[in-house]
Image: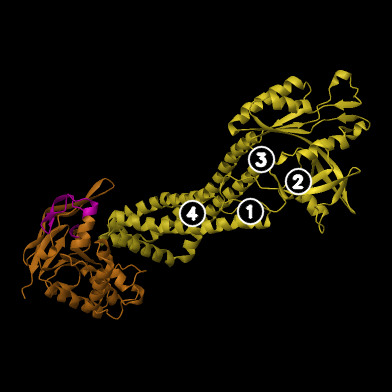
Chain colours: A yellow, B orange
Amino acid sequence: MFNFRLKRIIKLGIKSLWMHRLRSTLTALGIIFGVSSVIAMLAIGEGASREAQEKIAQMGSRNIIVKTVSPPEDDTQGGQTQMLKEYGLTYADADRFQNGIPNVQVIVPNRRLLREAYYRNRKASIEVVGTVPWYPEISQVRVQRGRFLTATDLHYKQGVCVVDEGVVRKMFAFDDPLGQDIKIGGDYYRIVGVSTEQAAASTSKGMNARDASGATKAAGANAGAIYIPLNTVKDRFGETRLQGDSSNAFAMEKVELEEIIVQVRNIDQVMGTRQTVQTLMTRFHKKNDYQIIVPLELMQQARDFQRIFTIVLGSIAAISLLVGGIGIMNIMMATVSERTQEIGIRRALGAKKRDIVVQFLSETLLLTLSGGVLGIFLGCLIPFLVSTYGEMRTVITTESLVLAFGISTAVGIIFGLYPAMRAANMDPIESLRHE
Amino acid sequence: MIQSQEPQGFEKDTAILAMHGLCKSYYLGGEELRVLRDINLTITSGEYVAIMGPSGSGKSTLLNLIGCLDRPTQGDYLLGGQSVLTLDDDQLSMIRGERIGFVFQSFKLIAQLNVVENIEIPMYYQGVSEDASARRARELATLVGLGDRMRHRPYELSGGQQQRVSIARALANDPLIILADEPTGNLDSTSGADILAILDRLHGEGKTLIVVTHDEQIATNAERIIHLFDGRIAKEEFNRK
């Protein structure tokens, strides 16, 4: 009984809406834009957050990264700068981490230098990473062809290197890089492997995950990196260099290591180990010449920020849905008063109040539901266009579709109910007389 | 819900409508306006009753009360042996749909529906299935002579044709009473005569008709004429044929 009723109610609703096509379309537009803006905004927000999270995940969620930073000038020397400024992480720090922290799985000490590299007549500014053979374990760097550095390379300070895709793109457009020699700072290095940085495993599912090529990668990664055994770098590049800023043209600085990456066994050991690292560092470094980065912490911050961002975007969009809902209510009020006589006729011919409510409510729901469906289409189209032409990543989640559709339905019921009730509560005699 | 008493269960000459001491008052600005006073009326199955009276005599109010569109202020009203005073809005709607067939002076057809769909409305609210109601609506349209106009919209029909649709609609649920309010009031004399012929025919088939009218012709066709004056039944006449 209910099923056959439903079919006829829908038929009747469509008929009434069809009578006023333009009006129905305009009314539904409010919902269409509301729903699509909810979806589009959430998709853009989600895309931005996922991008941030992936970037952080790329640093490794079980990693604690200790970086050398140039300490603030200390005034103990009476304003006179030292000729040789010695600061930053040392091999001793790495040993202390290795031996003093129980949860450590692996430690990677790195040197990071920016140098000019030459191959034939090509020249490029690249990042030289002096590292150890187990570097791939704690990073997303993977060997694509050839091999990574080995213990032998490290021990015998071999002049070998592994180049990443950035370098290949810049300098080996036509040649096979494997086996070639690349010149950095007066020395040649034989290329033994080509590496790639794989995307961090994403934990969330996306329907429309798109990567805008290159645009989002960090400038350093884009320029390309070349991995050379740590000991080789120590030997050939030394640890002292001219200080970076131009005001002290003759000042030298000495840095042993640019970073130490500590990886713990379990993700729940991260925060505890971070504490231990902090303690060790404050004990041995009186100058404030280091920085501890915990990707896990950053990820949580990013997530918190994302939540606020989503709420703000979502509420803006929800307001537009609300406006659409008010538009619908307005139209339905007009419709009800325009059809007063019809309501009277139906009541005289046996329609209960409930029948009238159902009739008008179903019209509103038809409007909002069809608006919702069209809004979902439009809402999926906008992020698609944004990521295609705007080089911005967008992710449409199922939740956002459900949310938008749910809100539009709720809007339909809430804003449709009042006009429908008003229609039903009209006095049949009065409304029959109404012309 | 109403205890279903099948309209078919009423023999000819049993009282299907009985009013005892019925009063209806409206309150306008705190002042009581007594529209109907002490109406006692019994109508038996198959009767053809005309209600006449000058305007303001309470004809329409009486019609609304008979049609269960309104409730009396005082008195008792039995329709088909059942008191309607205690019924709630839903039950009154049920009664209207099931036991009353309305024919209005200005037809009151729904403009966006065609002839068949208009006739179907009362059946829709009684839960008659789509097929059955469409079939019956087509039968009724043919019965009132609109067999070739079933897909027409009201505005494509003449006044007389519209009133025939309205009569067909009133017959849809096979009601106890057909209530007509000035059925020929908006029609020219030819169309009016057509409508009268249909009403006569329905009467001949044993339907109970109550017609509010100024039309002397209807009055002469009716078996009983009730004259209302100032909210009271002033006079009753019987036409012996």
**x, y percent for residue A209:** 61, 52
Please determine if labels 2 and 1 lie on a single subunit: yes
**x, y percent for residue A319:** 53, 47
* Residue contact between numbered discs 2 and 1, judged by CB atoms under 8 Å: no
Circle 2 crowding by C-alpha within 10 Å: few under 14, some 14–19, many from 20: some
Q: Amino acid at mark 2?
A: Ala
Give the left or right position of residue B237, taking residue A22 as reference. left
> Residue at label 4?
A327
Please determine if labels 4 and 3 lie on a single subunit: yes
Measuring 27% from the left and 76% from the top, which residue is drawn there?
Answer: B160
Circle 3 crowding by C-alpha within 10 Å: few under 14, some 14–19, many from 20: some
Q: Earlier in the sequence, mark 2 or mark 3?
A: 3
Q: Which span of residues is magenta-colored?
A: B65-91
Could you give the CA–CA distance between mark 1 and mark 3, rounded to whole angstroms? 18 Å
Could you give the CA–CA distance between mark 4 and mark 3, rounded to whole angstroms? 44 Å
Could you give the CA–CA distance between mark 2 and mark 3, rounded to whole angstroms? 14 Å
Measuring 60% from the left and 54% from the top, which residue is drawn there?
Answer: A383
Is residue B61 depicted above or below A150 in this figure?
A: below
Q: Secondary structure at mark 2?
A: helix
Mark 3 chain: A
Q: Nearer the viewer, mark 2 or mark 1?
A: 2
Q: Earlier in the sequence, mark 2 or mark 4?
A: 2
Q: Earlier in the sequence, mark 4 or mark 1?
A: 1
Determine if residue A435 is in view.
no
Q: Amino acid at mark 4?
A: Gly
Q: Nearer the viewer, mark 4 or mark 1?
A: 1
**x, y percent for residue A288:** 77, 25
Nearest to the observer: residue A151 or residue A259: A151
Residue B41's mark? none
Is residue B18 depicted above or below B190 in this figure?
A: above
> Residue at label 2?
A221
